Image (spheres, helix red, strand yellow):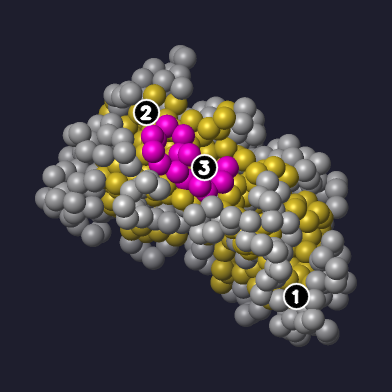
């Protein structure tokens, strides 16, 4: 079976993109109880997650299934040109492994170009399958699912180590992948060398980039002690953070807790370079040095990085904790975007307190969240926070707790979740509303989109996408009340490596309803000034602040 088959007709999605409809701009992809194609007569169950969209508007998701036996009741799907196809179902044969079937399916990760990677577990009822070899990683890079790594199989370039369960795959927009995996094999693997970073370029073989115990480029006398989840772009340039220790049996070489972490970049050929190290000056913050890295480095298609790091003043009488910042590189040089020593725009003169999460696009723009240094809660929140975006023109304030939430009848934001952002500069986030006035726990959450400004697009605007308590038409004449909303990648301290928002402004979301049903939907974030949609949703202009 070829999983990128765009001619296979299975189940056509419902189109609700009708100006003047109850929820103009939405398209229904799948609903609880609808027939699930190629599943032996099953219907969709709880539509649990893995929801993402590529640049063609095709959507992936995975779902439990109703009406089929246990052991076949989970499957992953994708819509291709408006037609739902099954990717894989529990009980299906594992590609490349005759006689072996699956018993558990992880969430699919999807790239902008439509490549897919997925963790899959083999059924213990298969001969030779046990807890030592049941998990594997498969990917579809354009010619169907192929196995990338299997627990219990030999890990290349490791001198006899075996893969343990592979970690979550990270896909570039172009479809290359990288992942961290644990290693095992008694006598050859121990706690000092049991984790490694791998890369697979479409058409190429699996390559080892970094492993605990390997010499760490750029830090003399050091070897890797830890490697983080990576980021990878479509040139296969891969960035990751890690920590180092002194090579066993050698002098420490000046490596200690103040300088034992860094960020490395591996180019297309695998050559690795240290680009930033703890202990180096924190660019743009006089007297401070980098202390550690608080989020995996993000890399864009130009090879530039967005970095979130803690920092400290080494000359202070007592070692300080809590200061941090966000930096972006361009042609190898880092620029400070914001730090806890700066005043937060739009926040009444208070400073950033700590940074939460960030998103990065190919224009070098960074969307980031932060708590504010306002413990008294002058803005009506015990721990006020905000969401900003840095562009070439400066910093734009998108939302701050205490601000009025557009389209929510004067309700105010109470908390904000991590953003997702596309290359157009649109930013989408989940938020909780303050429980006051007409706001209750039943209608106090929603999804908002900041529609970026641009030539021919007008000023930037913030709009409501969907809110709990809203009436929502899932099909002609079928209106339900939203109970909860979800966007993959937008959650407090969440990590979701696949795109929920593409560069055309299409947003894949999950909605649950008060009648117990759930669904997967595709929303078109409108261009500012597109009246057929904007007259139906509340929007508010956002002032650009430097």
Mark carried by residue 395: 2
| Comparing labels 3 and 2, the label whose residue is closer to the camera | 3
* Residue 312 rendering spot, x and y as whole percentages: 39, 48
- The reply, left or right, for residue 3 in relation to residue 357 is right
Mark whose residue sits in front, 1 or 2: 1
- Residue placed under numbered mark 1 in the picture: 189
Q: Residue drawn at (75%, 53%), measured in percent from left and top?
A: 209
> Which region shows up in magenta?
276-290
Q: For residue 515, which quarter of the picture?
A: bottom left
- Label 1 crowd (10 A; few <14 / some 14-19 / many >=20): some
Foreground mark, 1 or 3, reads: 3
Secondary structure type for disc 2: strand
Q: Residue furthest top?
A: 456
- Mark 2 is surrounded, within 10 Å at the Cα level, by few (under 14), some (14 to 19) or many (20 or more) other residues, namely many
Q: Nearer the viewer, residue 498 or 230?
A: 230
Q: Say which mark, if any, is on residue 280.
A: 3
Mark 3 or mark 2: whose residue is earlier in sequence? 3
Residue 367 visible in image: yes
For the point 58% across and 49% down, the residue is 262
Question: Looking at the image, which residue is at 20% across and 34% down?
Answer: 349
Q: What is the C-alpha distance between the residues marked 1 and 3?
A: 33 Å
Q: Position of residue 338 (x, y in %)?
A: 38, 36
The first of marks 1 and 3 along the sequence is 1
- Main structural element of the magenta stretch: helix, strand or loop? loop
78 on left or right of 397: right
Q: Earlier in the sequence, mark 1 or mark 2?
A: 1
Q: Considering the numbered disc 3 on the image, is that residue within a helix, a strand or a loop?
A: loop
């Amino acid at each position: 079976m070829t999983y990128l088959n765009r001619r296979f007709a299975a189940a056509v999605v419902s189109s609700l993109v009708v100006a003047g409809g109850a929820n103009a701009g939405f398209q229904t992809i799948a609903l609880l109880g609808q027939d699930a194609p190629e599943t032996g007569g099953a219907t969709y169950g709880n539509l649990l997650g893995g929801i993402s969209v590529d640049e063609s508007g095709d959507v992936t998701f995975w779902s439990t299934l109703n009406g089929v036996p246990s052991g076949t009741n989970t499957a992953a799907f994708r819509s291709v040109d408006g037609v739902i196809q099954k990717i894989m179902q529990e009980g299906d044969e594992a590609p490349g492994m005759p006689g072996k079937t699956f018993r558990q399916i992880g969430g699919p990760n999807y790239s902008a170009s439509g490549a897919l990677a997925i963790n899959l577990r083999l059924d213990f009822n298969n001969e030779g399958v046990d807890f030592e070899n049941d998990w594997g990683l498969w990917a579809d890079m354009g010619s169907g699912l192929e196995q990338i790594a299997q627990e219990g199989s030999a890990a290349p370039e490791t001198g006899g180590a075996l893969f343990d369960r592979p970690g979550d795959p990270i896909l570039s927009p172009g479809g290359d992948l990288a992942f961290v995996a644990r290693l095992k094999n008694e006598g050859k693997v121990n706690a000092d060398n049991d984790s490694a970073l791998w890369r697979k370029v479409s058409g190429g073989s699996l390559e080892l980039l970094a492993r605990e115990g390997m010499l760490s480029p750029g830090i003399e006398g050091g070897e890797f002690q830890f490697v983080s989840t990576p980021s990878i772009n479509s040139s296969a340039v891969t960035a990751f953070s890690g920590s180092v220790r002194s090579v066993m049996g050698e002098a420490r070489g000046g490596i200690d807790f103040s300088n034992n972490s860094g960020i490395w970049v591996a180019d297309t050929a695998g050559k690795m370079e240290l680009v930033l190290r703890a202990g180096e000056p924190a660019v743009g913050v006089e007297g401070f040095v980098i202390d550690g890295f608080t989020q995996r480095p993000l890399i864009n298609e130009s090879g530039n990085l967005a970095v979130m790091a803690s920092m400290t003043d080494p000359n202070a009488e007592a070692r300080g904790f809590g200061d941090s910042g966000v930096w972006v590189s361009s042609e190898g040089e880092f620029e400070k975007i914001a730090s806890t020593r700066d005043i937060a725009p739009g926040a009444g003169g208070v400073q950033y307190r700590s940074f939460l999460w960030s998103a990065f696009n190919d224009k070098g723009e960074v969307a980031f969240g932060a708590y504010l240094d306002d413990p008294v809660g002058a803005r009506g929140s015990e721990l006020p926070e905000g969401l900003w975006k840095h562009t070439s023109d400066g910093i734009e304030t998108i939302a701050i707790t205490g601000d009025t939430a557009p389209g929510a009848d004067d309700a105010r934001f109470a908390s904000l979740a991590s953003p997702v952002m596309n290359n157009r500069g649109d930013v989408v986030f989940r938020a909780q509303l303050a429980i006051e006035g007409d706001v209750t726990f039943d209608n106090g959450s929603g999804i908002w989109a900041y529609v970026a400004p641009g030539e021919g697009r007008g000023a930037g605007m913030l709009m409501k996408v969907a809110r709990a308590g809203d009436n929502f038409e899932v099909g002609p004449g079928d209106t339900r009340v939203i109970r909860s909303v979800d966007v993959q990648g937008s959650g407090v301290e969440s990590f979701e490596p696949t795109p929920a928002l593409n560069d055309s402004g299409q947003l894949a979301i999950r909605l649950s309803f008060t009648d117990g049903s759930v669904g997967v939907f595709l929303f078109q974030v409108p261009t500012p000034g597109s009246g057929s949609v904007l007259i139906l949703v509340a929007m508010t202009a956002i002032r650009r602040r430097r």
